[in-house]
Amino acid sequence: VAKINPQAPLDKVCVLSCGISTGLGASINVAKPPKGSTVAVFGLGAVGLAAAEGARIAGASRIIGVDLNPSRFEEARKFGCTEFVNPKDHNKPVQEVLAEMTSGGVDRSVECTGNINAMIQAFECVHDGWGVAVLVGVPHKDAEFKTHPMNFLNERTLKGTFFGNYKPRTDLPNVVELYMKKELEVEKFITHSVPFAEIN
């Protein structure tokens, strides 16, 4: 149970309880992109859109959305994505595509798919020396993460997060305040409002 601002509309802030906070926190609390940096977001579902929103709030200047479904791209612009990559459009690994687009790699990446290959790509696309990759998606229980040890020796960082490193009771009230101050636009995440009578 978290005590939040009593003025907050419950039919809006209820969506902060899971995916939005997870993606938002993965960017703001864990990846921590510096102002003007470049961030790649793998997977443009609700969590990935929230990660893009977090990168936007943090001040990233380029936010590259990576998804196999190009129909998600236009909507993702509303959440701060500035450009897009569909891995199916390229005949080389997407981490190489991103490295070429960004002169050596992105500053931060946030993986929101749960696909082990996307996790590896998200790590391998960050820049040597300072790049940070954050894993958010939950992989298959038998999945194995394989990468060359040089990627670590070259001073890339790999992190994971659960619920965006927010502690619900103490931190969710602050996320609600971000919404109340209009810094976080929760309405963008809501596509339909349905009365209980219409729910299967």
Image (tube, rainbow, N blue to C red):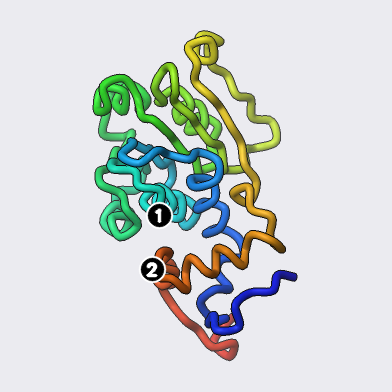
Are there few (<14), some (14-19), or many (20+) residues within 10 Å of tag 1? many
Numbered label attached to residue 10: none
Task: Pick the residue in front: 101 or 73.
Answer: 101
- Locate residue 66 relative to residue 47 in the image: left or right: left
Residue 177 percent coordinates (x, y): 52, 69
Question: Would you say 32 lies left or right of 200 here?
Answer: left
Q: Nearer the viewer, residue 88 or 20?
A: 20
Using the image as rendered, state which of residue 104 and residue 33 is in the foreground: 33
| Residue under the point 51% across and 9% down | 150
Which quadrant is the N terminus positioned in?
Answer: bottom right
Q: How many C-alpha atoms fall within 10 Å of the one at disc 2: few (<14), some, or many (≥20)?
A: few
Q: Position of residue 27 (x, y in %)?
A: 48, 45
Q: Residue at x 55, y 32 (%)?
A: 116
Q: How many marks can you see?
A: 2
Instruction: Evaluate if marks 2 and 1 touch, with contact meaning CB atoms under 8 Å apart.
Output: yes
Residue 64 visible in this rendered orientation of the protein: no
Residue 17 higher or lower than 57, as above or below: below
Q: Position of residue 99 (x, y in %)?
A: 31, 23
Q: Is residue 15 above or below residue 96?
A: below
Amino acid at the residue labelled 1: Glu
Amino acid beneath label 2: Lys
User: Looking at the rendering, which quadrant does residue 140 occupy?
Assistant: top right
- Name, please, the residue furthest toward the right: 1
Q: Which mark is residue 53?
A: 1
Give how far apart the Cα atoms at labels 2 and 1 are: 10 Å
Mark closest to the chain's N terminus, 2 or 1: 1
| Residue at horizontal 56 percent and vertical 58 percent from the top | 21
